[in-house]
Image: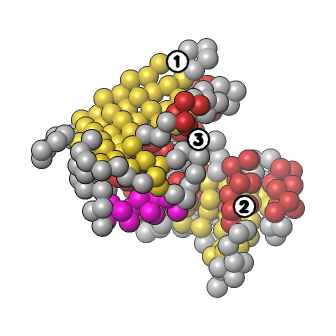
Amino acid sequence: MATRWGICSAGKICHDFMVALKTLPAADHQAVAVASRDSSRARDFAKRHEIPKSYGSYEELANDPNIDIVYVGTINPQHLRVALLMLQAGKNVLCEKPMAMNLREVQQLICAARDSNRFLMEGLWTRFFPVSNAIRCLLSQNNLGEVKMVKAEFGTCMMGTPRVVEKDLGGGVLLDIGCYCLQFVCMVFNGEKPESIHATGFLTEKDSRVYVVPHKSGGEWESQGVSTASSVSTPQLHQQYRPALRSRGSAAVSPERTEGIFPATTGRE
């Protein structure tokens, strides 16, 4: 029996999600309902993606008994309220990143998922890229040696995007694209928690940028992750691949490819 999806919101990110969902066999996954605060937008979205039901409120979607899991693609400040609504209604939830606006809100969602015994996941799609699987495989086989430093950089032109520049929408690059860099660092270090985190950022009329440096001591070297995110395009970052430092050399991932890893160099970096 196919997993029955409810789509929460009718914006661009939900459209992108539906395009991806349709690449999977219909026997395994089907979108059965969509909800928006604007019923006409929900109807248009349903027609475009051949979804049988549309609702003009999130509450109606939450109360639909024929939905197994809900994809929450609302604007960032609504993630907590909408995801809580779905969890408390007994729905499993895949919530678009960022899961919430801060630690307190994330903890609320985790507690709600545990209380209702429901699945809750943050939608960080980069974790499922073929290159991410390849990196995890290399690390699990110890082909890279002990990783000592990871550099992750992501810059793209977003100063015209409201959620990046408007404070009420959680403006800034950390929640929107900085999370990709941080999750990559966390993935390479296999979820090991840092002993300390140093973060700094700045905001100008032309740029919003943040630098985050998780740090852990121990062993022969200290381990460090350097995460940089910027709301302006930085072509030089796309021309110079940033390696993951390791005890037997380095490996780099192209920011423009999702399938391959550049060959590692030899010798200590």
Q: Residue at x 72, y 78 (%)?
A: 26
From the viewer's perspective, is residue 22 above or below residue 184? below
Please name whichever residue, 219 or 41, is drawn nearer the observer in this view of the structure. 219
Residue 245 picture location, percent across and down: 31, 44
Q: Are marks 3 and 2 in contact (CB under 8 Å)?
A: no
Closer to the N terminus: mark 3 or mark 1?
A: 3
Residue situated furthest front in the rendering: 266
Main SS, magenta region, reads helix
Give the CA separation, mark 3 to mark 2: 19 Å
Q: Secondary structure at mark 1?
A: strand
Q: Residue at x 46, y 52 (%)?
A: 262
Disc 2 residue crowd, few under 14, some 14–19, many 20+, Cα 10 Å: some
Quote the CA–CA distance across marks 3 and 1: 20 Å
Residue at the spot of label 1: 203
Mark 3 vs 2, N-terminal side: 2
List the residue tagged with mark 2: 18
Contact (Cβ within 8 Å) of mark 2 with mark 1:
no
Q: Amino acid at mark 1?
A: Leu
Q: Position of residue 33 (x, y in %)?
A: 74, 65
State whether residue 65 is above or below residue 61.
below
Disc 3 is placed on an element classified as helix
Instruction: Name the residue tied to disc 3.
Output: 76
Write down the region rendered in magenta: 128-140
Residue flagged by tag 3: what amino acid is it? Answer: Asn
Which marked residue is nearer to the observer: mark 3 or mark 1? 1
Q: Are marks 3 and 1 in contact (CB under 8 Å)?
A: no
Mark 2 vs mark 1: which is more N-terminal?
Answer: 2
- Which of the pair 6/146 is nearer the observer? 146
**Residue 253 percent coordinates (x, y):** 47, 49
